[in-house]
Amino acid sequence: MSLRARITLAAVLAVALCGAAAGAALLAAVERDGRTAVDRDLRARVAQIAPGRAGFGDGGFGGPGLGPRARGPERLLAGAGTFAQVTLGGQVVRQGDVPANAPPVPARDGFSTVRIGGAEWRSLTMSLPTRAGTVRLELLSSLAPVAARADNLRRLVLLVGLGALAVTALAAWGFTTLAVRPLGRLRAGAARVSGAEDLGTPLPDDEGPVEVRSLARALNEMLARLQASTATMERALHATRRFAADAGHELRTPLTGLRANLDALARNPDLEPAERGALVADMAAEQERIVHLLEGLQALTRGDAAEHLPREDVELADLVDAAVYAARRRHPGVTFELDDAIADAEVRGWDGGLRLLVDNLLDNAALHGRADGHVRVELARDGDALLVRVEDDGPGIAAADRDRLLEPFARGTGTTAPGTGLGLAIVAQQVALHAGELTLAESALGGLAVDIRLPATAVLALGGR
């Protein structure tokens, strides 16, 4: 059943219940008023038959001792539906429109309702003292007129009620059609969302009643969450495809070299120790290159899925100090200088990603700088940002090549230093994930200067949101 049909049915049922209750109350009131009018008429007739009750006359109803004081009781009983009974000394006298099988006079005074021949009569019984003894007078009036008026009113209420229900159904259907029209527009908008590319199209949330607008806003929020989830999934799939493609492409050369060296060892079991040692050393270098390559690819892949990584407040100076200490052990011939001017300033982000960023900057400066050279690391405040500057004294990078070297697997022209070409790409990725800025420039030491600005003490969501 549609919403319009449900609302229409509910309105009709509500009107039917209210109409039934009101009709029942009206019929009860009409019947009560009719009985009250009959009771008043019975009192008036008794008052005329026996005025004052104490002076009841003789011969009024034709019985012994009921006289002319009754003043013509036949006239008081004129008209259908009224009769009287009088008992005196066991004798019953009836006058008026007496029905068949009339019951005897009740033994108790007052009003009562009796049924005679399937019809209801209203009865008033009184005890009247006379000179001949106590007379029992019962005056009865038919309730058929009251029942007829109630039946007529019942039919009228039924007809009016049925008409009111019909009008209510039509009005409810029409008004509900207008009321649910915004839902129709909302349904049409939702039907247009047939794929991930449609999730960015919002549904209209400025029309219709409050409930419809609230539903539209809730649906738009749901679509936004679905769009974000879909984007995250697509990035994860892209990262997976990229990892597989890059790994397959970049691992082919070192693995081929390893296979060639293994074949050479297999074909020449009697190689001189020096030649065998050279081959083994070459294979160890290729294995180390493969390990570094896989670590770099893994770092890029984790960065592509940054929404699922932990975020916290990180003291940048402590992180850089630990990274410099580790770099001194990895590159014992290089002099590392740290200038810290930010104290305990913090950034919001992924601790592992920030450490990866700094480690790659230091390794890149140590590997591509001058042999046994000098690397200077500076931490400073730059407005609302924290500045991390890493400089080396190597040959530097030409301005035309700087943007290209931020791409994965890109290497400088003529470089002979070992590496995978992923260092600056990982740095650029992590800077973007932490809503920072990356600048490559010429160093005062003669080589490359890398400036990174990260928002200080700002709660950032990884991914630049």
Image: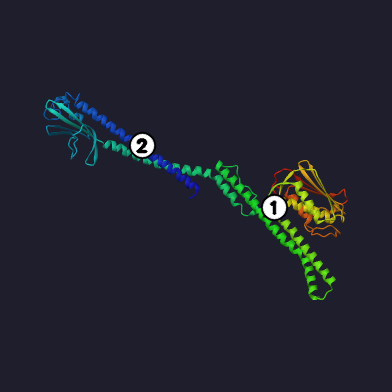
Spot occupied by residue 177 in the image (x, y as percentages of width and height): 51, 45
Q: CA distance from mark 1 to mark 2?
A: 72 Å
Residue 8, compared with residue 62, is above or below; it is below
Quadrant in which residue 245 is drawn: bottom right
- Coloured how? rainbow
Q: Is residue 27 left or right of residue 8?
A: left
Q: From where the camera sits, is residue 209 visible?
A: no
Q: Identify which residue is drawn at 73% across, 48% down.
A: 434
Spot occupied by residue 385 in the image (x, y as percentages of width and height): 76, 43
Spot occupied by residue 182 in the image (x, y as percentages of width and height): 56, 45
Q: Identify which residue is drawn at 42% across, 41% down.
A: 15
Looking at the picture, tell me which residue is in the foreground, 322 or 77. 322
Q: From where the camera sits, is residue 234 visible?
A: yes
Neighbourhood count class around disc 2 (C-alpha, 10 Å): few under 14, some 14–19, many 20 upward: few
Residue 103, compared with residue 423, is above or below; it is above
Quadrant in which residue 363 is drawn: bottom right
Looking at the picture, tell me which residue is in the foreground, 59 or 223. 223
**Marker count (numbered):** 2
Labels 1 and 2: the sequence-earlier one: 2
Neighbourhood count class around disc 1 (C-alpha, 10 Å): few under 14, some 14–19, many 20 upward: many
The residue under label 2 is 25
Q: Is residue 241 left or right of residue 102?
A: right
Q: Amino acid at mark 1?
A: Ala
Secondary element type, mark 1: helix
Spot occupied by residue 188 in the image (x, y as percentages of width and height): 58, 49
Q: Identify which residue is drawn at 77% across, 47% down.
A: 437
Looking at the picture, tell me which residue is in the foreground, 36 or 97. 36
State the mark number for residue 370: none
Secondary element type, mark 2: helix
The residue under label 1 is 306
Q: Amino acid at mark 2?
A: Ala
